[in-house]
Image (cartoon, rainbow, N blue to C red):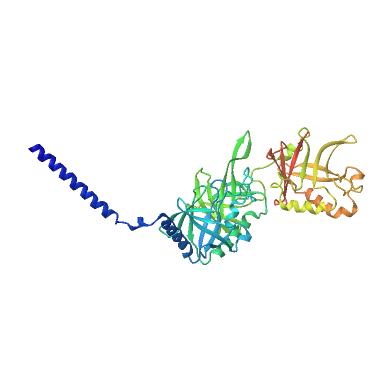
Amino acid sequence: MKKLKHIFHRTVASALLVLILIAFACQDNKVDPVFHKSPAERSLESINSLRELLKASEDGWIVSYKPSKNETGSYQFVFKFLKDSIVEAASDFSQNDLNPVRSEYTVLQGSTTKLSFSTFGALHRLSDSDFSPIPGDRGAGLKGDFEFLYYGQNAGGDLIFRTNRTQDTVIFRKSTPGALNDLAQSYANLGRLTGRRSVYRTLQETNGNKIVKSAFDLPYDARVIMIQSVEQMVVGATLISSYYDGYVTGYGLTPQGIFLDSVKLSNGSFIKNVAFSYDATRNRFAATLKGGAELSIGDADGPIVPVNGQKFMLDPTLTSSLAFFYGDEDLGGLTTPEFNRLFEKVSDIGLAPRFSFAMQVTYNGTKIDFISMPGTASVTNSTVRPLLVFEDKGDRLVMKRNGFRDPDSVVKPANEALYNEFMDFITDPEGFYVENLGRVTRYSNLIFTFTSVKDPSVRFGMYHVAR
């Protein structure tokens, strides 16, 4: 009997539990009506929500975008979303992009809500294959994206996106009425950084009486700087300086100056997001660090590590000649526009787009040095061959005129004015800093550069021909 009662109680309890669960399940169906909406309705709601957020900022949105973490710096954009598909965009990418230009955008729904800039605009310049300055990545552009996945807002009302391809975070910050003016002021600082009076530049760390200099250069046109520290050591009784520990860091533009992604200090530590202001008095960008030390970036009058490439060049067992080719793809980055303009001018007298230094050539039983300038500029409509005397001054090379190799290679009287202008540059008494860069092109030749001591903004590169 007791056993039957126990079975009865268990059966009743089970039935009651089932009824309770059914009741709660029915209540759960009424908790959140959003699940009554279809996927299409929820997708449309997300799309409309992002569109309204984009249009809600009266002055638009400011975006700082670094297309590649390790290979580019940052570019600034101002976006103003006018309608459901129209956006005005301006950028500090170039002078032409400072003024807003209209293009189209779309908001799509996939795994998440996506903002896509659907027609060509300022942003697409970061992925344009026709502009591919990153070494070894020809055709890859700057590796930028123009589709962004939406991940909500932060506490300040900024919109948080991630790039579609690389999942890098990009923040859209509310713009201000003066954003376009700030963009123009920022772009002016690009000219102050890249427009140089010298091919030699330094990053200088000053702390009291201690000054530490590093060399910096702009290796390619993607808002990056290469910085090389200088190491000094005593070899015998001589103090030797050399470059070591080079690294590349990205930079961006601000209305006040520039910022660097990171800088290595003389104590070996790195600091990030360093803001530099432009100092017009010193023509340098400067940043004051905690503790009072100063970092500054600007031009230098000469190399911070002494160079003596002329010693190798003047060794008759090592060098037969050095050759310059106008517009050469490999030497292009080593030859400055200032030198190209000078050479273009003298080329008008009938010179071929090249010249060479011929070293210790035997002519009529005598060893001579001269410049070979092919073309039709001589009195015999042939090559001009002025003789040279090379003088090693220790830290520089000085070249002096010494007549012509022979009567047939004398320049025509009608060509003398432009010819003399070029030769006055080559034989300037202050001379040239000569650097042996080693094998830095696709060819096996060593590469030498000649930088004017008088005007260090003028430099040309030459291929070395071994004897």
* Quadrant in which the N terminus appears: top left
Q: Is residue 290 above or below residue 240?
A: below
Residue 50, given in percent of the width and then of the height, sits at: 45, 59
286 on left or right of 307? left
Residue 160, given in percent of the width and then of the height, sits at: 46, 55
* Quadrant in which the C terminus appears: top right
Q: Is residue 362 above or below residue 90?
A: above
Which of 40 and 143 lies nearest the eye of the viewer? Answer: 40
3 on left or right of 118? left
Count of numbered marks: 0
Which of 185 and 426 lies nearest the eye of the viewer? Answer: 185
Residue 204, given in percent of the width and then of the height, sits at: 58, 49
- The reply to whether residue 365 is in sight is yes
Which residue is most to the left?
A: 1
- The reply to whether residue 280 is in sight is no
Which of 443 and 189 lies nearest the eye of the viewer? Answer: 443
Residue name at image x 77 percent, y 53 percent:
342
412 on left or right of 165? right
Which of 242 and 177 lies nearest the eye of the viewer? Answer: 177
Residue name at image x 88 percent, y 42 percent:
405
Residue name at image x 73 percent, y 53 percent:
338
Task: Give the image quarter of residue 440.
Answer: top right
Residue 150, given in percent of the width and then of the height, sits at: 46, 54
